[in-house]
Image: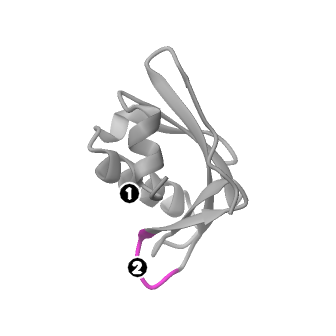
Amino acid sequence: MSALTVREGDGAVRFAVHVQPRASRSEIVGMQGGAIKVRLAAPPVDGAANEALVELIATSLDVPRRAVRIVSGATSRAKTVEVEGAGAAAVRRLVGQ
């Protein structure tokens, strides 16, 4: 299993996420290739999966939705997410690292 790379700076953290849309439920399931693997119940249509991802990350890290944004990969399964107000340790705890 590859270690998760979390970049910190300017009060925010950035990390890679691998998304699997149209799952039976939305959940963080572990790691895949150095990224957090996330299953989302939402389909990848009209930004629904991206919205579900923002909601799941915000809830999991206990930050407001506006603190989470997708900085790259909006139309891809491989995304980079930035979260303001969360530390690297909190992100690593999501996957047990």
Please indicate, yes or no, whether residue 75 appears anywhere in the rendered image.
no
Q: Is residue 25 within the magenta segment?
A: yes
Please report the residue visible at 45 percent of the width from the left and 44 percent of the height from the top.
91
Q: Which residue is more in the foreground, 1 or 59?
A: 1
Q: Name the residue type under label 1.
A: Leu
Colour scheme of this structure image? one colour
Seen as rendered, the residue at the extreme bottom is 24
Q: Are marks 2 and 1 in contact (CB under 8 Å)?
A: no
Q: Give the quarter of the figure containing the N terminus.
A: bottom right
Which circle's residue, 2 or 1, is located before the other in the chain?
Answer: 2
Please report the residue visible at 57 percent of the width from the left and 34 percent of the height from the top.
14
Residue beneath label 1, please?
56
- Spot occupied by residue 59 in the image (x, y as percentages of width and height): 29, 52
In which image quadrant can residue 56 be found? bottom left
- Spot occupied by residue 57 in the image (x, y as percentages of width and height): 40, 51
Side of 42 where 78 appears, left or right: right
Q: Which residues are magenta?
A: 23-27
Residue beneath label 2, please?
25
